[in-house]
Structures are given as C-alpha cells and as structure tokens.
Image: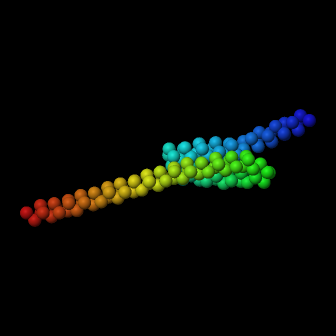
C-alpha cells in the first residue's frame, strides 16, 4: 500500500511538471529571454514549447475540457503575438547591423580610394 501511494505521488508530481500552465509560464519566460538577447537556441526552445502546448491543448480538447482548452488557446495566441514582435525586433536589429556594416565597408573603400589618389598625386609631383 505504501508503494502504491508513493507511485501515485510520483505520477501526480510528473503530471504537474508537464502541465499546460507550466508550458505557458516557460514560454513566457523564454520569449522574454529571446527579446532581451535573441539567439537561435532560445528560438528553437520556443518553437518546441509551442508544439508541446499545441499537443497539450489538443489533449484537453480530446478529454472534453473545452473551457480549459479555450483559455489556453487564448494564452497561446497572446504568446505567439509577443513572440512575433520579438522576432520582428530581432530582424530589424539584424538589418540595422547589416546596413551599418555596409556603410562602414563603403566608408573604408572610400578612404582606400582616396589614399590611392593622394599617393598618385604626391608621386607625380
């Protein structure tokens, strides 16, 4: 009987760890981390968590818990909006960095060409 109670406690603990609300909390935290410091690893984790949440919501719908599933769909939609905004901010920042890099390269090329003209002018005098 003691073993059965312990096994039941373990199962309930594991089920609680894998709850949709924990997935929502984890997603929210990961999206904030992505917004602060976007990288491919966090992006992959977020994509996996969204897939997991979709499965959890489908499971609730299959169990007839449509009200719980509907609430989670609403939370998921909000999180997807936050994530999309964070990805757009990352893209804008990447584009800005690329333009700055191009501008710096153009500036350096201009300096090099100017140096060549100065050298040729100085050598012909």
> At x 12% / y 61%, what residue is drawn?
122
- Location of the N terminus by quadrant is top right
Left or right: residue 54 compared with residue 107 = right
> At x 28% / y 57%, what residue is drawn?
107
Measured from the top left, where is residue 63 in percent x and y?
80, 51
Taking depth in this image into account, of 38 and 117 the one nearest to the observer is 38
Q: Which color mode does the image show?
A: rainbow
> At x 65% / y 48%, what residue is drawn?
74
Left or right: residue 12 compared with residue 34 = right
Q: Residue furthest left?
A: 125
> At x 64% / y 47%, what residue is drawn?
75
Left or right: residue 123 compared with residue 29 = left
Residue 111 in view (yes/no): yes
Residue 49 in view (yes/no): no
Relative height, residue 113 to residue 19 (above, below) = below
- Location of the C terminus by quadrant is bottom left
Measured from the top left, where is residue 117 in percent x and y?
17, 63
Measured from the top left, where is residue 17 in percent x and y?
72, 42
Relative height, residue 86 to residue 4 (above, below) = below
Left or right: residue 36 compared with residue 110 = right
- Which quadrant of the structure image shows residue 26? top right
Q: Residue furthest right?
A: 1
Relative height, residue 89 to residue 124 (above, below) = above
Tally of numbered discs: 0
Measured from the top left, where is residue 52 in percent x and y?
68, 52
């Amino acid at each position: 009987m003691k073993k059965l109670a312990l096994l039941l406690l373990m199962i309930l603990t594991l089920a609680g760890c894998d709850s949709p609300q924990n997935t929502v909390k984890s997603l929210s935290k990961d999206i904030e981390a992505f917004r602060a410091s976007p990288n491919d690893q966090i992006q992959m984790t977020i994509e996996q968590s969204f897939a997991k949440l979709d499965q959890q919501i489908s499971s609730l719908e299959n169990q007839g818990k449509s009200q719980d599933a509907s609430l989670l769909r609403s939370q998921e939609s909000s999180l997807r909006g936050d994530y999309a905004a964070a990805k757009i901010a990352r893209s804008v920042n990447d584009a800005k960095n690329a333009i700055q890099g191009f501008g710096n390269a153009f500036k350096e090329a201009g300096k090099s060409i100017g140096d060549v003209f100065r050298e040729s002018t100085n050598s012909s005098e």
